[in-house]
Image: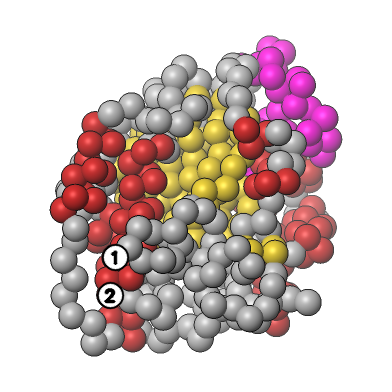
Amino acid sequence: AQPPGKRPRVASLADLAGPEPVCHVPKDVTARIRRNLAAAPSVEGAGGPGRFLLLSWNIDGIDEAQGADLMLRTLAVAEHISVTQPVAVLLQEVVPPQLQLLMASQTLGEHYSVVCPENPRMPYYCAILLHKRRARATGPPRTRHFEASKMGRHLLSVDIVVDGRDHAPLTIMTTHSESLKTEKVERTKQIAEALVTMAEHAALSDPGCLRTAVLAGDLNARDDELVAARKRARERCEGVDDVVDAWTFCGSPKNHQFTWDTEVNTNLGALYKSKCRFDRCLFASPGLSGSSGGQRRGAAAAGVVAGRGAAWRAACFELVGKDKVAGLGRFPSDHWGLQIAWALDGAEISSSSSA
C-alpha cells in the first residue's frame, strides 16, 4: 500500500512563520560548523584528484513544527555539509528561513554560493549550493517550471566545472516531483521531461570534452512510474537509454536503498509502515553509463573512453541524516539524504556502502 500524503501543503509564508518567538541560534553549533569548514573533509572520496561528493536532500522545510525545531534541523544539515564538504548540495522543500540560515556567514555562507529558482510559484522550492573554491558555474542557472503542476514544481539546473577540469563539465539538476499517489500522471510527465533534459545535455559532449548530466532529488517515484517516464521520454530522445540510476550503478547497496522509511524515521509520527526509494540520483555520462548500466562499471573503472577523454562516474552511494538532532529527538528531515561520491580518470573510492 502506498503511504498517504505527508501533510497538508502550506499556502503562504505566513503559515510557515506562525506565532513562534524569535529563535537564538546556538553559537557552539555555528562555531563547530566554521571549524569543520576550515579543516579538510572527514569523509573518503570528498576530495583529492578527480574526486568529489554530491549531496541531495529533501530537508522538509514545511514540517508542521517550525521555530526552534526548524532551526535545529537546518543546523544539523549545515553541520553535515561542513563535515563532508560536497562540491554541490541539491536541496528540495526549502523555505526562505532555512536558506537564510544556511547561507549566513556564521554557517556556510563564506564557503558556498546558492542557486535559487526564478520566480518560484510556492513558498517552498529547490535550491543548489555550490562550493565556492571547487565548483565554477559556466553559465547562468536555468529554471523550467512544470506548467501543469498543482504544487509549483520545477527543474533547477546549472552547468559547472569541478576543480578547473574544463574537459569534464557537469550539468547538475534537481527537482521535487509532484507529490501524492493521486498525481501519478503529472509526476510521470515531469520525470520524463527531466530525463529528456539530461540526455540532451549529455549529448553536448565532443571528443575532447565529455559532459556528465546528473539529476538528483525527491522524485516521489515508484519503480513503475520511472519505467513509464523512460518510455515516454524515449519517444522524444533515444539518449534517455544512457541515463542510469546511481544506486544501481554502485551495486545496489541494500543498507542504502530506502530514502523514506516511516518505521525508522519517526519525524512524522506515522501510524503506518512504509519503505520507498522516493529520492533518486540519475546520471548520464557518455561511454560510462548506458542501457547496460552496471555492466559498464568495469569499463568505467578505466575512467577513459578510448579516444574521447574522461568523464565522471558515480563511485559510491550512501544515505545520510540517520542520527537524531541533539536535544531535539527528531531527525534532520523525514527523508534520508543521498550522498554520492564521484570519480574521474579511474580514481577508486572505497566505502562500506558498497558492501
Please say whether residue 345 is one of the residues in the magenta stretch.
no
Residue visible at 16% across and 66% down in the picture: 24
Residue that carries the numbered disc 1 in the rendered image:
71
Q: As rendered, which of 156 and 97 lies closer to the eye?
A: 97
Left or right: where 125 falls relative to 222: left
Task: Name the residue rendered at 56%, 31% in the picture.
Answer: 342
Three-letter residue code for mark 2: Gly
Mark 1 neighbour class, 10 Å CA radius: few under 14, some 14 to 19, many 20 or more: many
- What is the x, y in percent for residue 306? 72, 13
Q: Residue drawn at (40%, 24%), measured in percent from left and top?
A: 163
As shown in the figure, which amino acid type bears the numbered disc 1? Met
Q: Position of residue 32 (x, y in %)?
A: 24, 43
Magenta stretch encompasses residue 290: yes
> Would you identify the image quadrant in which residue 207 lies?
top right
For the C terminus, which image quadrant? top right
* Image position, residue 180 (x, y; %): 64, 78
How are the colours assigned in the image?
secondary structure
Element type at mark 1:
helix
89 on left or right of 26: right
Relative to 254, residue 343 above or below: above
Q: Quadrant of residue 241?
A: top right
The N terminus sits in image quarter: bottom right
Name above or below for residue 229 compared with residue 78.
Answer: below
Q: Image point 37% across, 44% down: which residue?
A: 81
Distance from the alpha carbon under mark 2 to that under mark 1? 6 Å
Q: Position of residue 96 (x, y in %)?
A: 30, 68
Asked whether residue 118 appears in the rendered view, the answer is no
The residue where tag 2 is placed is: 67
Residues drawn in magenta: 282-310
For the residue labelled by badge 2, is the local secondary structure a helix, a strand or a loop? helix
Mark 2–mark 1 CB contact (< 8 Å): yes
